[in-house]
Image (cartoon, rainbow, N blue to C red):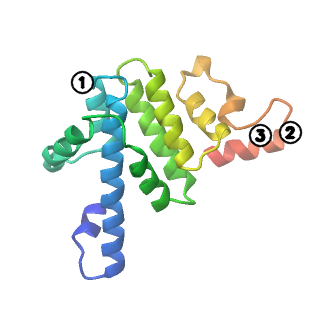
């Protein structure tokens, strides 16, 4: 549907929406590139993760590659792109949390999340307005099932009532 909206010029609302989608895509590509470079090198696994998670169409691979390569020249300067996404999706916590989840996926692709990558993701999450509990919940949900702490994922405490835990569980599902 995004492509159809992008091509539509007849309705200014659609045009504004398409512009927002392009801005979001560009910002996410730049964040992904700068995150990939944060640990000093961009691995093949990280490139595959970016392509897979961002679902880049074959006809856009070359253009996205140019943007990615320019952005990865250094990891600094990612904050304005995070602020653009935060502003565009202000109030839509699900989208912002999913962006953080995607960034974790990319950082994990080479088998290890470096301290630099982790600090960058945490800073982006803070720019998005996520609190420490939300950030920890996303981090915890990235673990394998045998290591996961369900209370952290559900943003709960062991002494919370079953009703509260159930509400939080249903909110996530």
Instruction: Using the image as rendered, state which of residue 122 and residue 111 is in the foreground.
Output: 122
The quarter holding residue 41 reads top left
Give coordinates of residue 54: x percent, y percent: 32, 43
Q: Residue at x 48, y 22 (%)?
A: 115
92 relative to 17, above or below? above
Instruction: Using the image as rendered, state which of residue 115 and residue 103 is in the foreground.
Output: 115
Give coordinates of residue 128: x percent, y percent: 53, 49
Label 2 or label 1, whichever lies nearer to me, is 1
Instruction: Using the image as rendered, state which of residue 142 and residue 40 is in the foreground.
Output: 40
45 relative to 85, above or below? above
Q: Residue at x 66, y 48 (%)?
A: 171
User: Alpha-carbon neighbours of circle 2 within 10 Å: few (<14), some, or many (≥20)?
Assistant: few
Dots 3 and 2: beta carbons under 8 Å? yes
Q: Residue at x 44, y 49 (%)?
A: 82
User: Alpha-carbon neighbours of circle 3 within 10 Å: few (<14), some, or many (≥20)?
Assistant: some
In the image: residue 68, left or right of residue 137: left
N-terminal of the pair, mark 3 or mark 1, is 1
| Residue position marked by numbered label 1 in the rendering | 44
Gap between marks 3 and 2, in whole Å? 6 Å
Secondary structure under the numbered disc 3 in the rendered image: helix
| Residue position marked by numbered label 3 in the rendering | 165
Secondary structure under the numbered disc 2 in the rendered image: loop
Label 3 or label 1, whichever lies nearer to me, is 1
Q: Quadrant of the N terminus?
A: bottom left
Looking at the rendered structure, the number of numbered marks drawn on it comes to: 3
| Residue position marked by numbered label 2 in the rendering | 161
Give coordinates of residue 168: x percent, y percent: 71, 44
In the image: residue 131, left or right of residue 5: right
The quarter holding residue 113 reads top left
């Amino acid at each position: 549907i995004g492509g159809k909206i992008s091509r539509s010029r007849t309705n200014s609302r659609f045009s504004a929406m398409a512009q927002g989608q392009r801005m979001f895509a560009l910002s996410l590509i730049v964040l992904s590139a700068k995150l990939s470079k944060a640990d000093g090198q961009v691995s093949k696994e990280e490139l595959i993760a970016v392509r897979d998670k961002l679902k880049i169409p074959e006809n856009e691979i070359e253009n996205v590659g140019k943007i990615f390569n320019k952005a990865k020249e250094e990891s600094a300067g990612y904050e304005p792109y995070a602020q653009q996404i935060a502003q565009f999706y202000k109030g839509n916590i699900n989208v912002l949390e999913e962006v953080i989840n995607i960034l974790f996926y990319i950082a994990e692709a080479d088998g290890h999340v470096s301290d630099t990558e982790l600090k960058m993701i945490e800073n982006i999450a803070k720019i998005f307005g996520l609190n420490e509990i939300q950030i920890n919940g996303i981090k915890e949900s990235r673990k394998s099932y045998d290591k996961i702490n369900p209370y952290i994922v559900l943003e709960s405490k062991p002494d919370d009532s079953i009703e509260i835990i159930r509400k939080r569980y249903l909110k996530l599902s």
